[in-house]
Amino acid sequence: MTDFCIGTETRPLKAAIIGSGPSGFYAAEGLLKRQGLSVEVDMFEYLPTPYGLVRAGVAPDHQSIKSITNIYDRIANLNNFNFWGNVEFGRDITIEELEQRYDLVIFAIGAQSDRSICIPGETLQGCHSATAFVGWYNGHPDYRDYSVDLSCKRAVIIGMGNVATDIARILSLSPAEMEQTDLADYAVEALLSSQIEEIEIVARRGPLQAAFTPVGVRKFPDLDQAIPCVDPAELQLEAISRRLLEQTQDKGILRNMEFLNKIVDNRPGTKEKTIRFLFRRSPVEIVGHNDRVQGIKLVKNELFEDQQGNLKLSLSDAVEIHPTGLVFNSIGYQVKPTPGVQLDQQRGVIANRDGRLIDLDTAQVLRGRYVVGWAKRGANGVIGTNKQDSLASLDCVFEDVAKQRIGLMKPPSLVATEQWLTEKGIRFVRFEEWKQIDKAELSHGDSKGKPREKITTVQQMIELLNTTD
């Protein structure tokens, strides 16, 4: 017996998951392992390769973190799970089609575009989004041919989260350190000829508010040819910050301060490259000449306590111009426009209430549509955060199933997903085919003494599969 009107062996709950990153896999696992509920899951991914940012976002020198894909492999082997790669939502399949075939649709599409700094000069050559640069060095097919000029002496990174520290570290790697990564081959070639000598990581607020985690900077003290530095004046705290530091029990803040205090005595220039941490500065203009970045104008900020006891920021009259040929925007991410989905522009997420999609005009819940991960809550947390986030959204799913709020009004299409996609002329990629790509990349990497050598175009992936069929 089951408490659900659908979800039996004769009438399983049919779920479509859009996106194959961590939040998508955790949602699939939660559905398939639900006691007393029979579920069939189809996961759609626009690339032939799964894992989302674990493959395309986690830094190439953080190989231990990428081992979490072993968990997703086990989820993919659960009964009634099907992966359909190289199938793009909005192009190959639409929300209207999915609603004819599935009881529910879960969006696990992540936050795929950068928040704009909104200052003059952002369109100059040499100003890059974190998404594009990270995608470029990670071998993401969308950024395989992205142009990056590393011939300048200084790079400036706006933002101080883990992505910012990843960019700084990748720009600093020695040839020997690169060999321990799965950096794309073309990125290795470009980085080997880089002329960068100094990297500045710039934060709007003070050191207590730095958004990086200990994992993001743990390798900094041991880099072969780069030394991390911070001027002692940068770590001087305002009265409210001193009080916050005395009262905090946040281990992340304490460890970050421990790291910064350890590097305060480091001397710039003692290695080939210097990484500087700068606080209380906001960019106000990217300065250019002949359509290229020549520098960035930063205004110094003052932190103060308002009448409610909150930490606030105000711009001072002190302005600095830092010569540079490279500026990276790493201030955060938002969901890019997606067909058939309304966005909460202020939060940069899919419009939702606790994981249920809503219509912004009426504030009504949209039947059978859900969201998980960064697309639900914003770009924050670590990989493991997505598990609890997905399970929280599934609580809404199970409640809605139990109360008969979802479920197709008529029996779902009897046409199998494989036939449906084939009739559309889509060259989809199954999970076992992804494993063929995976095997080829590992083998190619092994021949070069690297963990992996990624195939960086969809065409090459499909050609590989077609020759091994």
Image (spheres, rainbow, N blue to C red):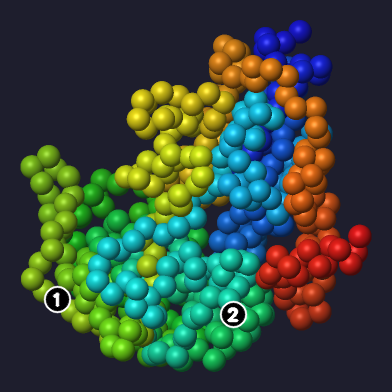
Residue 229 locus on image (x, y percent): 35, 78
Residue type (three-letter) at the residue carrying disc 2 = Ala
Question: Label 1: which residue?
Answer: 319
Q: Residue at point 54% right, 81% down? A: 173
> Measured along the vertical axis of the image, is residue 355 above or below residue 290?
above
Residue nearest the viewer, comparing 469 with 1 = 469
Q: Is residue 45 visible?
A: no
x and y percentages locating residue 163 in the rendered image: 46, 63
Q: Secondary structure at mark 2?
A: helix
Residue marked by disc 2: 187
Q: N-terminal of the two: label 2 or label 1?
A: 2
Residue 175 appears in which quarter of the rendering?
A: bottom right
Q: Residues within 10 Å of mark 2 (few under 14, many from 20)?
A: some
Q: Amino acid at mark 1?
A: Val
Q: Quadrant of residue 464?
A: bottom right
For the point 41% across and 42% down, which residue is it?
A: 343
